Image: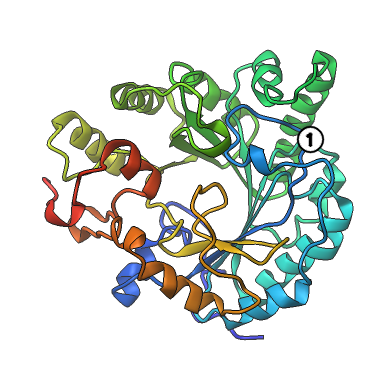
């Protein structure tokens, strides 16, 4: 096994130590390097959320995965690896997947000094997550609700059949209890909320429940309709900004609040947008993460070996781990015209610019390499 060259394992994850943010490796190497791998490990899920970006890939029965040894061999070849992320579907839906894939991958990460994260709805029996706890750094969950009724409505909007409220209630209560147990045991449970047409006026209430659950981080992203969720209503940038201001006004300063994929930049001519970014930079325990997808992270589908910019992208695969090393595939992506269209970096603002979704939605004709921060 290759030794990890840039291990942050000795330092607790914190607002000052977020290895998922590509800004760290960019500063170190002077260019983007592949420091993170995300793996899609399941297409099974016990929910059908209306906002799910990968909902069109969910199935009732899934094919065999590629051999775990193939994935671990490719991970071993990635020279500057720092983080491992596991996503689905619900990664822990199958006990066999937990036993034969997830736990060995997490053990590999821990032995190599890599940080690890799993994206889960946390609604299954606690034993599923307890098996991961000795090796996992971040349990990442989605939380966009102020009540069980909202959980019921949002979480099963695409089920295609009626889901009894009592069943939803059991899952909702189990999610909250699991989050509390894992947090009490020392795990960083990070609850992500999306700013969208349902939540933008409720962010403070959602935050309060996340604090009550014992989560150590609240992650906040505007929702950009794409893929499975492409038809959901959009809100304006002004509404996003107002939601963030309200959240900052009412948040608990004791937990880490991480914002990501914001459509606001210090090179904007909009003074209100720049003022918000200035406030975010000055707030205690608040960070704004640059988007890792395609910057320092790529996604590997463990059913096919195909490699993507991100798990929810409409873009086709640009390679397969059966034929190519991960570092080579990343360089292939960076050299593509699409990657170069969002390849700007502003040291003054610690900003890597928009991701592909944000650029397509708001900045189609903008060349960020010709803009300068107004600070």
Q: Position of residue 49 (x, y in %)?
A: 65, 29
Residue designated by label 1: 46
Residue positioned 65% across, 39% down in the render: 56
Looking at the rendered image, the quarter that the N terminus falls into is bottom right
Give the structural element (helix, strand or loop) at label 1. loop
Residue positioned 32% across, 48% down in the render: 354
Location of residue 267 by image quarter: top left
- Farthest residue to the front: give it: 316
Please name the colour scheme applied to the rendered image.
rainbow
Label 1 environment density (alpha carbons within 10 Å; few <14, some 14–19, many ≥20): some
Residue positioned 60% across, 18% down in the render: 146
Residue 204 relative to residue 26: left or right: right
Q: Is residue 295 above or below residue 366?
A: below
Name the foreground residue: 101 vs 310: 310
Q: Position of residue 208 (x, y in %)?
A: 54, 24
Q: Position of residue 250 (x, y in %)?
A: 42, 22
Residue 104 relative to residue 322: left or right: right
Name the foreground residue: 286 vs 109: 109
Query: How many marks can you see?
Result: 1
- Farthest residue to the bottom: give it: 2
Residue 254 appears in the rendering: no
Q: Is residue 171 above or below residue 179?
A: above
Residue 211 appears in the rendering: yes
Residue 99 relative to residue 48: left or right: right
Q: Position of residue 206 (x, y in %)?
A: 54, 23
Residue positioned 28% across, 44% down in the render: 281
Q: Is residue 166 above or below residue 300?
A: above
């Amino acid at each position: 096994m290759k030794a990890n060259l840039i291990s942050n394992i000795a330092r607790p994850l914190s607002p000052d130590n977020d290895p998922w943010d590509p800004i760290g490796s960019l500063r170190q190497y002077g260019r983007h390097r592949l420091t993170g791998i995300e793996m899609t490990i399941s297409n099974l899920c016990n929910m059908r959320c209306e906002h799910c970006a990968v909902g069109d890939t969910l199935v009732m029965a899934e094919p065999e995965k590629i051999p775990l040894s193939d994935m671990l061999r490719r991970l071993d070849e990635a020279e500057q690896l720092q983080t491992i992320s596991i996503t689905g579907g619900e990664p822990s839906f199958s006990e066999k997947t937990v036993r034969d894939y997830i736990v060995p991958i997490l053990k590999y990460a821990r032995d190599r000094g890599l940080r690890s994260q799993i994206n889960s709805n946390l609604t299954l029996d606690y034993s599923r997550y307890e098996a991961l706890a000795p090796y996992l750094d971040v349990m990442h969950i989605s939380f966009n609700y102020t009540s069980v009724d909202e959980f019921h409505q949002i979480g099963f909007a695409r089920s295609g059949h009626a889901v009894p409220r009592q069943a939803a209630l059991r899952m909702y209560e189990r999610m909250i209890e699991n989050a509390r147990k894992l947090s009490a045991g020392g795990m960083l449970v990070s609850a992500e909320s999306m700013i969208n047409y349902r939540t933008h006026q409720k962010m403070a209430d959602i935050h309060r429940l996340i604090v009550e659950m014992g989560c150590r981080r609240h992650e906040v992203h505007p929702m950009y309709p794409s893929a499975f969720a492409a038809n959901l209503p959009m809100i304006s940038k002004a509404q996003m900004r107002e939601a963030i201001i309200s959240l900052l006004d009412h948040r608990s300063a004791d937990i880490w609040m991480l914002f990501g994929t914001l459509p606001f930049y210090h090179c904007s001519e909009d003074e209100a947008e720049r003022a918000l970014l200035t406030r975010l930079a000055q707030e205690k325990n608040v960070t704004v993460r640059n988007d890792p997808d395609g910057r320092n992270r790529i996604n590997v589908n463990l059913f096919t070996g195909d490699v993507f910019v991100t798990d929810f992208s409409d873009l086709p695969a640009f390679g397969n781990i059966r034929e190519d090393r991960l570092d080579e595939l990343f360089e292939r992506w960076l050299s593509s015209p699409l990657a170069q269209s969002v390849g700007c970096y502003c040291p003054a603002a610690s900003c890597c610019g928009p991701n592909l979704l944000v650029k397509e939605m708001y900045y189609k004709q903008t060349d960020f390499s010709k803009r300068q921060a107004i600070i």
